[in-house]
Image (cartoon, rainbow, N blue to C red):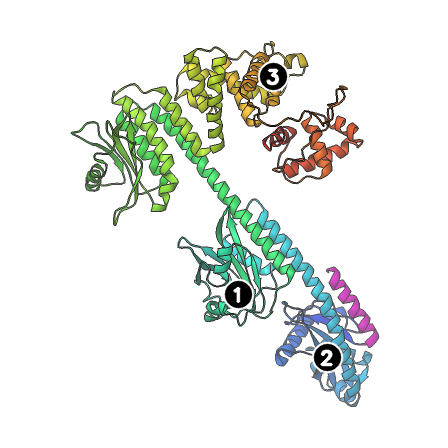
């Protein structure tokens, strides 16, 4: 039994002992909520068949009186009176408090004479000898006392239900934030209904493509008619919140004209709330609900529905990110496999089948085809999903649409297009274009026109790769490997814009730095190309580039990063010498890419290069000199009035990280600890410096990692660099 129910039971025991009556709390079906208190019949008479008979008798009494506001007196037999008082708790089914039995002194003899007939139906009649007799005045007094006891019981039960409600809300939020589960929107609305006990109705209006908010999931009064309601932006409560994207709560809305749409469907709200639910940075829909009896919702309820909406937003955003991740991973895997297959294609027909099969598996449209133009006199076709007559008709349409586009001397490269024809599936048409010549068109049927933007860039990149191979297979010329590099770099921008930007910054630095190292022009060219594709794995690039001069810098760069991941050499001497026997010899190109990668990754901080122990110290020093030669100093310098710098050679001042506004909020002590971490101090050194225990330092580090969203010191330091600490 819960704590509040224990108090209710104790209170009933005390009242029964003082009054001489039997007391019991039941629900509206006569089922016991508390055990009977007082001079009741032996336990054998309140369990089993006797209990079921008592429940049926009490249920019949409740039904005969209907809804009651105060206590009542009921004669269960001649001269035998049973008292009943309702225990009303808001938003909960009414319970009933029973007390008995009272015996009318004028009917004692007659009642005892009829005891045997009613004993089976009402076992409390067994206690006639132990209960007090009653006159009218005594009955009224006992009923007043029972009403007061019912009021106290209601207060205790309200606290009990509030505790249960709080538990249900916490459990629902925990479920909402759990990483697993495939609940539908309607299932979440149903679950919210159980936890949001102040709300009589709840629903979700999802945002449609037509900028409308359509109610599709709903629980509450008028459940048959409310689903299907729709609101435009700014219309009614839901439309206003959809426009403002801010939660709102309204009290006393029964006369508000904005409820007209609900009233027409049979729903008459007296209070209402609407909370936006976001999917990433876009509005997914509006969660709404309210009461048809209460004019206002409590602050606790308001906070809960906002917390639920925030959790729901996080969940669907995470699901969207997970779906995007899986989709991008599938596309990347497909791209890698397709490019490898395309590169190894031995004939044009095989190349066409690869394109058709890949697009059908990825898009799952009704058809795909490749229309090739090996000469001005004929056209070749490979298709799946089209009959012969359909294919011939479609090819003629493609030829007509793309005639005169591209070709030698064309000013601009043809762009992919969307072809929509009445009664046919929309199709993404990608030109196979190389060296100012249109070689053919790759046509992919879509499920709907909205997929065009989703697949346009991806298919365009694959089409460029296929075009270069097609050009080679037709012996129209030798394909420059630099084209493959540009293609791969463009594909990188499609999946990882940050890495794509870094490759161009690396190339802009690599070429002039390589010239200061007196490298040959051919080596500089290969280094510049390697900077554009170094994020790809060497195993993948080897099937596409096939150039040792291009592959060596990339392979050496990845080997250096693997060494760094394995850990720093134990001795300081080995760390300071790149020529140490424990460190493999790497080419200049791979070392340069590693230097540029660390330099850009750590926000152009030259101190980060100290971690590059596999790279030659001479090469690192040369890069520092190169950066110094490019730096332009501009500003004002005061010639007096400032304190002389401390030249005592003591410990450097603590790192100031107060200016890192991009970092999550840290306490003053956590910032102090992080500052010492940025100086490279260990936990023991930090503890000695701050005069605290090493265990306390570990606790601070744990809090710092959690707030920064990192897992180790290296990530924390990298985040500090990115946030501008070294500037």
The residue closer to the viewer here, 246 or 604, is 604
Helix or strand or loop: what does disc 1 sit on? loop
- Number of residues whose C-alpha sits closer than 10 Å to that of mark 2, classed few (under 14), some (14–19) or many (20 or more): many
Count of numbered circles on the image: 3
Residue receiving disc 2: 83
Residue receiving disc 3: 613
Which of discs 3 and 1 lies nearer the camera? The answer is 3
Q: Position of residue 149 (x, y in %)?
A: 76, 73
Residue receiving disc 1: 220
User: What segment is highlighted magenta in the picture?
Assistant: 1-20
Helix or strand or loop: what does disc 3 sit on? loop
The residue closer to the viewer here, 170 or 554, is 554
Residue 448 seen in render: no
Q: Is residue 6 magenta?
A: yes
Q: Earlier in the sequence, mark 2 or mark 3?
A: 2
Q: Position of residue 48 (x, y in %)?
A: 68, 68
Which of discs 2 and 1 lies nearer the camera? The answer is 1
Determine whether label 2 and label 1 are within 8 Å by CB: no
Query: From the viewer's perspective, is 303 left or right of 553?
Result: right
- Number of residues whose C-alpha sits closer than 10 Å to that of mark 3, classed few (under 14), some (14–19) or many (20 or more): many
Q: Residue at x 50, y 62 (%)?
A: 237
């Amino acid at each position: 039994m819960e704590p509040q129910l224990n108090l209710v039971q104790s209170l009933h025991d005390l009242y029964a002992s003082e009054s001489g009556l039997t007391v019991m709390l039941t629900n509206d079906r006569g089922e016991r909520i508390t055990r009977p208190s007082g001079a009741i019949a032996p336990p054998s008479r309140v369990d089993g068949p006797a209990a079921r008979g008592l429940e049926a008798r009490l249920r019949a009494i409740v039904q005969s009186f209907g809804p009651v506001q105060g206590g009542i007196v009921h004669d269960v037999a001649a001269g035998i009176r049973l008292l009943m008082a309702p225990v009303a708790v808001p938003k909960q089914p009414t319970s009933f408090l029973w007390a008995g039995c009272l015996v009318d002194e004028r009917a004692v003899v007659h009642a005892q004479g009829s005891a045997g007939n009613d004993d089976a139906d009402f076992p409390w009649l067994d206690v006639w000898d132990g209960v007090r007799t009653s006159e009218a005045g005594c009955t009224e007094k006992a009923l007043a006392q029972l009403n007061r006891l019912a009021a106290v019981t209601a207060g205790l039960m309200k606290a009990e239900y509030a505790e249960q409600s709080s538990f249900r809300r916490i459990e629902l939020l925990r479920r909402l934030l759990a990483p697993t589960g495939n609940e539908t929107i309607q299932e979440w609305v149903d679950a919210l209904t159980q936890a949001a006990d102040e709300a009589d109705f709840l629903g979700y209006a999802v945002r449609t493509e037509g900028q409308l908010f359509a109610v599709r999931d709903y629980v509450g009064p008028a459940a048959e008619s409310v689903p299907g309601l729709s609101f435009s932006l700014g219309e009614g409560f839901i439309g206003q919140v959809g426009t403002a994207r801010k939660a709102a709560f309204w009290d006393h809305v029964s006369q508000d004209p904005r409820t007209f749409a609900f009233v027409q469907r049979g729903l008459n709200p007296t209070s209402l709330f609407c909370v936006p639910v976001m999917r990433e940075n876009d509005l997914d829909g509006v969660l709404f609900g309210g009461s048809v009896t209460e004019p206002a919702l409590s602050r606790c309820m308001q906070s809960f529905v906002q917390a639920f909406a925030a959790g729901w937003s996080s969940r669907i955003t995470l699901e969207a990110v997970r779906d995007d991740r899986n989709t991008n991973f599938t596309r990347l895997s497909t791209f890698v496999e397709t490019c490898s297959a395309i590169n190894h294609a031995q004939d044009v027909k095989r190349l066409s089948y690869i394109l058709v099969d890949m697009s059908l598996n990825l898009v799952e449209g009704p058809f795909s085809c490749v229309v090739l133009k090996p000469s001005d006199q004929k056209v070749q076709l490979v298709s799946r999903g089209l009959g012969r007559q359909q294919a011939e008709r479609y090819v003629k349409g493609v030829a007509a649409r793309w005639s005169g586009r591209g070709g030698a001397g064309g000013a601009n490269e043809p762009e992919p297009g969307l072809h929509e024809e009445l009664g046919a599936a929309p199709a993404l048409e990608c030109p196979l274009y190389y060296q100012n010549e249109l070689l053919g068109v790759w046509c992919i049927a879509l499920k709907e026109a909205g997929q065009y933007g989703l697949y346009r860039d991806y298919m365009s990149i694959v089409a460029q790769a296929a075009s270069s191979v097609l050009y080679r297979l037709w012996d129209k010329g030798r394909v420059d490997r630099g084209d493959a590099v540009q293609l791969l770099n463009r594909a990188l921008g499609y999946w990882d814009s940050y890495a794509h930007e870094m490759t161009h910054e690396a190339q802009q630095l690599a070429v002039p730095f390589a010239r200061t190292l007196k490298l040959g022009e051919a080596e500089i060219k290969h280094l510049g190309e390697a900077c554009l594709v170094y994020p790809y794995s060497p195993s993948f690039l080897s099937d596409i580039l096939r150039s040792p001069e291009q592959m060596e810098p990339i392979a050496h760069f990845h080997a250096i990063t693997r060494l760094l991941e394995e850990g720093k050499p134990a001795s300081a001497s080995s760390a300071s010498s790149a020529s140490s026997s424990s460190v493999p010899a790497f080419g200049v190109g791979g070392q340069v890419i590693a230097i540029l990668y660390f330099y850009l990754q750590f926000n152009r901080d030259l101190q980060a290069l100290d971690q590059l122990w596999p790279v030659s110290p001479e090469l690192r020093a040369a890069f520092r000199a190169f950066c110094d030669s490019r730096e332009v100093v501009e500003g004002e310098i005061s010639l007096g009035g400032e304190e002389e710098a401390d030249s005592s050679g003591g410990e450097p001042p603590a790192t100031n990280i107060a200016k890192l506004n991009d970092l999550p909020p840290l306490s003053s002590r956590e910032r102090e600890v992080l500052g010492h971490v940025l100086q490279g101090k260990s936990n023991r050194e930090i503890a000695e410096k701050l005069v605290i225990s090493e265990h306390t330092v570990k606790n601070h580090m744990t809090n710092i990692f959690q707030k920064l969203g990192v897992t180790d010191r290296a990530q924390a330091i990298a985040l500090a660099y990115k946030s501008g600490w070294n500037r």
